[in-house]
Image: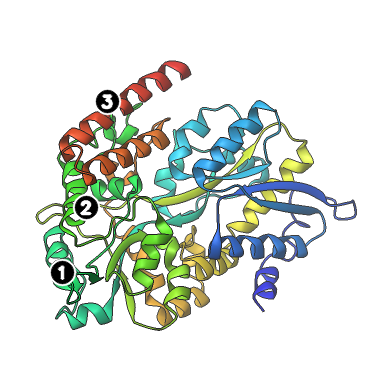
Amino acid sequence: MKGQRWRSVGIGLVAMSLGLAAAQAPVKVSFWHSMGGVNGEAVDRMVKAYNASQNACTVEATYVGSYDDGLTKLQAALRGKNPPHIQQIYDIGLQAMAESGQIIPASDLARQDRYDLSGILFPLARYYNLDGKYYGIPFNASTAELYYNVDALKAAGFTRPPKTFEEFVDYARKLTKKDANGNVIQYGATIRVYGWFIEQLIYNQGGYVVNNDNGRTKRATAVTYNGPEGVRAVKWIVDMTREGLMPNVGRDGAAQRQAFTSGKAAMFVESTATLGAVQREVGGRFQFKTAPLPRPAGTKGGTAIGGAALYVFKGHPDNETRCAWDFIKYAISPKVQFEWHKATGYYPVSRAALELPETKAYWKENPNAKTPVDIILSSPPTKSSQGAVAGVMPQIRQHIEEAMELAIAGKASVEEALNQAAQKSNEAIARYNAAVR
C-alpha cells in the first residue's frame, strides 16, 4: 500500500513537463542522499514510486553517509569531473554551494520551466533564498525540539514540559533515579554534542552565530557564538552532564535516541526528523510528546530551519538535467511531501502540503507531527531566526562541538573552550573569504 500511495501522487508529472520523450529509453539520473535508517527507507520508496509513475526518467538513489561524508565524496567527484545530477546537502552548505560555480541555480531551472516557487513555506524561503535566488530547493525541513516521556514526568509530579533552562535542570534533577548501589537507572535527560543544537539554542535567545546579522546583511567575517547566548547554551549542557543528570553520549545520535526510547533518559533534544525512529522504537511502551526547546528565563528569540536542500550540478546533458529537475518537482509536490512527512517527521516544505485534508487528519491523530510546524511558523521573522550563512559553516559547527567536548571533559571552562573555537572559526572564515573574492 505504501508504494501505491507514493506512486499515485506523481503519475503523469514527467509526461507533462519539459518536453521529455516517454517513448525513448529512460534517462538515468543519479541522486546522492544522506538519509539512513527509517528516513532512508522513505527515500527509497519515493524514488521507486517516481520511477514507476513514468517511463521517461530513472532516478538511481545512492546513500553517501552523513551530510559531512556526502560533501567529502562530492569534492572528490567534482575533482574527477563526475558529480551526481542531484545531491542532498544540508542547510549550512548553502553559501558554499552558491559560490561554488558547480551548480545550476534552482531559480534558473524554475524560470526556464515557468515553475512557481512562491508556495515554499516562508521560513524556508527566508533561509534558502540568498541574494534573491534559490540555489537549491528545500526538500527535508526540520527544526530542533524537545522529546519527553509523559509517563516519567507524571511520576515525578510534572504535568507539562519545561519551558526554561532553569525548569529543565529542576526537572532533570527530579527525574534522575538511582538504585540502592548508586547506579543511575534513569537519567533526567540526554543532549548529545551537536553544534546545530547550540546554534538553535542561540537563536532561541535572539542571538547570532556569525556577525553581520548572521551573514545576512553582508558577508560574515567573524563568529559570535562565543558571546553570552552561546556561553549560556553550552554551559547548560555541560553543567547537567558533569552533575550526572545526563549521560555523556558524545556525538552519537543513535545512543542518545536509544537512551530515551529504552526509558533510560526521560527527555532529549533532537531533530523533528527523529520522530519516525522514536515512534518505531518506543512502540507504545510509554507515551511521549514533543515541545519547543526551552530557553533561559527572561530571554526571547526564535527558531531557524534545519534539514537540507536538493542541488542540481552542472556538467550533464540537458535531457539528464531536465529529468533531475523533474524529480525535484515530484519530491516537493504536496502529496509526496505529505507521505514524506508522515514517514519521517520532516515537515512539508510547501503551504499546499500543509493544507491537504490528509495532512490535517494525520495531525489530529498524531499531534507530535504538527509540533515542528507550529514552532517554525510561530517563530519571529528576525535576522537571528533566519539562520546563519557562511562558507565555512560546516567547520564552524565542528569547532563548536570540539569546544563542548573540551568543557564536558573539564579540560577548559566553557568560556575558554568557546573562545579557542572562535579563533579557529575566524581563521577559517578569513581563508574562505579571501579565496572567493
Q: Is residue 200 above or below residue 391?
A: below
Does dot 2 land on a helix, a strand or a loop?
A: helix
Q: Is residue 151 above or below residue 143?
A: below
Dot 1 or dot 2, earlier in sequence: 1
Dot 3 or dot 1, earlier in sequence: 1
Residue at the far front: name it: 181
| Residue on which the image places disc 2 | 237
Left/right of residue 7 with respect to residue 255 in the rendered view: right
Q: CA distance from mark 3 to mark 2?
A: 22 Å
The three-letter amino acid code for the residue at tag 2 is: Ile
| Residue on which the image places disc 1 | 171
Q: Position of residue 132 (x, y in %)?
A: 46, 36
Residue count near mark 1 (Cα–Cα under 10 Å), binned few <14, some 14–19, many ≥20: many
The three-letter amino acid code for the residue at tag 3 is: Gln
Q: Quadrant of the N terminus?
A: bottom right
Q: Looking at the image, which residue is at 36% across and 24% down?
A: 429
Left/right of residue 384 with respect to residue 360 in the rendered view: left
Q: Position of residue 306 (x, y in %)?
A: 41, 51
Q: Looking at the image, which residue is at 90% across and 51% down?
A: 24
Q: Position of residue 173 (x, y in %)?
A: 14, 67
Can the viewer see residue 104?
Answer: no
Can the viewer see residue 357?
Answer: yes
Q: CA distance from mark 1 to mark 2?
A: 14 Å
The three-letter amino acid code for the residue at tag 1 is: Tyr
Residue 410 quadrant: top left
Left/right of residue 27 with respect to residue 379 in the rendered view: right
Residue 224 quadrant: top left
Image disc number at residue 423: 3
